[in-house]
Image (cartoon, rainbow, N blue to C red):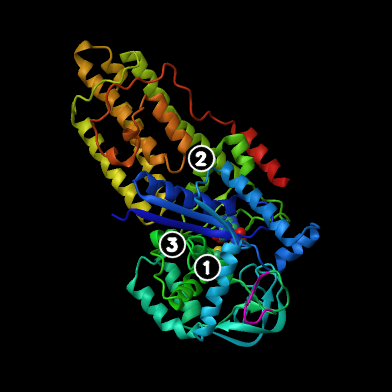
Amino acid sequence: MNNKFYITTPIYYPSGRYHIGTAYTEVLADSVKRYHNLKGEDTYMLTGSDEHGQKIQEKAEEAGKSPKQYVDEMAVMAKELWAKMDIQYDDYIQTTESRHEKIVQKIFDRFMEQGDIYKGEYKGWYCVPCETYFTETQLVNGKCPDCGREVKLMKEEAYFFNMKKYADRLLKYYEEHPDFIKPAFRKNEMINNFIKPGLEDLCVTRTSFDWGIKVLKDPKHVIYVWVDALTNYLTALGYLSEDDTLFKKYWPADLQVVGKDIARFHLIYWPIFLMALDLPLPKTILVHNWIMMKDGKMSKSKGNVIYPETLIDRYGLDSTRYFLLRQVPVAQDGLFTPEEFVERYNFDLCNDLSNLLNRTVSMVNKYFDGNVPKYNGNQNEVDEEFEKFTVEQIEKFEQKMEECEIANALQEIWTIISRTNKYIDETTPYGLAIEEENKEKLESCMYHLIENLRKIAILIKPFMNDTAENIFRQIGIKDEELKVWKLLKENDKIKNAKVIEKGEPIFMRLDPEEEIEYIKNVMKG
Ligand code: MSP
């Protein structure tokens, strides 16, 4: 087993408040990291902010601040949000830090020396909000293919990275490493849309503004933008610096999570830069789809933006994280609607999970004074089938997690929850409690219910940490060993647990009408 796990998220543009879509990447990566933690791996997660460029310079000017002051304040805001969302990153890199800037200059120099970068003149269609040049053929109806906005024809002296030189090597790499790109259809998208039609060289500097890292040998140019942005994944680990301990320990990345809009940069340019640096490539780049609204993308002008704080403050962090991860199946877009949010809360969290816990805790109190009976084997076929089913489900969950199909992995947990609720109907503990001769069966039933709640709590822990801890507390699981992956599939390890006297519901039913109205109103702003 791999026992180190380096995971990265994109570095974010400090362009304003982050909505639930932007937060999705971070929650996804954090949950995957926590899952690997639970399995006992040494994880390291990187996030940060992408702070150079004309757009940021302009935003700072509008705010009457220096660009550095502006980006620093935005980084504080981002960190506050990630703290509120309990994102357990290990390092936060800002591309304006000198630990990054110095190394980017070295990398750029090396590319120049190797002849990977050459000077030319750039003429192209530039999308200011996306900070990307496009060729005539890439435009869609004369507009930006990524955001659909107006593009400007611009011309300037610039340096280029010779991408063509690496195209065949990249194709071969894709071919030989089937796990490199997930989901696999993104690979075909890259090959058919960008590589086969002829990979274009990438413009890597600008002279039209100066908020960027200067090219040492030609300082009227600033490095822009992908050599600066993408290399953060290396510089944060101390690559080419005096202390490269982390780099030696963690590189290559095990998983790099990116949204679909930046797939091209991560699946084509990034591996090529790494090849040019003679570095191993990340094991997997996961491209996730987007969270959308009924009327398309989230935007202030449409009045359909929803911020994570809105949901967290009213419904709690765990339900917010659960909804985001359950709603976007990674390989397809997911829809946010107030109706679905409330429905998932009431059905999945309240009816299925919270009620299961509540019923179980009150039965253990009623029948055994709160003492969880000892494991006494399987009393009948129902018990046997129940244990087997749960272990098989855990394996399915694991497979989905390995494939990074997070929404499907959550679905597998909820199948266990439903099956556990059904187990109560099948074993009818209230009936068993009437006759003394059924005592052993009743003990077995209570044990199995508590055992499954323990398993469920472990499984949901990466996604909903507080809820998991709350379940452990209510069912009296104190031993840390029983809370981690190692003993997850075991069925007879709980000893001397005592449930709490009065189970508190972990999720209370929401009034659909009231809450849908509430969310709709907040969205209008
Ligand atoms: N700065 C670049 C990344 C450079 S990485 C070397 C960037 N930043 S971003 O702030 O615009 O986006 C950050 C992440 O948020 C991206 O992964 C992007 O796909 C994601 N999302 C933005 N809107 C989203 C949704 N509506 N839904 C899901 N993810 C979304 O790109």
User: Could you classify mark 3 by the number of other residues whose Cα lies within 10 Å: few (under 14), some (14-19), or many (20 or more)?
Assistant: some
In the rendered image, residue 37, in percent from the top left (x then y), is placed at: 39, 46
Q: Can you identify the residue that label 1 sits on?
A: 231
Q: Can you identify the residue that label 2 sits on?
A: 344
Q: Distance between the residues labelled 3 and 2?
A: 41 Å
> Given the current orientation, which residue lies at the most extreme bottom position?
120
Q: What element carries label 2?
A: helix
Circle nearer the N terminus (1, 2): 1
Tell me the amino acid under the disc marked 1.
Answer: Thr
Name the side, left or right, on which 432 lies relative to 303: left
- Which one is closest to the eye, mark 1 or mark 2? 1
The quarter of the displayed image where residue 70 is located: bottom right
Residue 142 makes an appearance in the image: no
Tell me the amino acid under the disc marked 3.
Answer: Phe
**Residue at the (33%, 29%) spot, across then down:** 479
Circle nearer the N terminus (3, 2): 3
- Relative height, residue 521 to residue 118 (above, below): above
Residue 234 makes an appearance in the image: yes
- Which one is closest to the eye, mark 1 or mark 3? 3
Magenta residues, as a range?
Answer: 212-219
Q: Are marks 1 and 2 in contact (CB under 8 Å)?
A: no
Q: Can you identify the residue that label 3 sits on?
A: 247
Q: Which of 375 and 465 is in front in this view?
A: 465
Tell me the amino acid under the disc marked 2.
Answer: Arg
Q: Do the residues labelled 1 and 3 touch (CB within 8 Å)?
A: no
Circle nearer the N terminus (1, 3): 1
**Residue at the (41%, 40%) spot, across then down:** 460
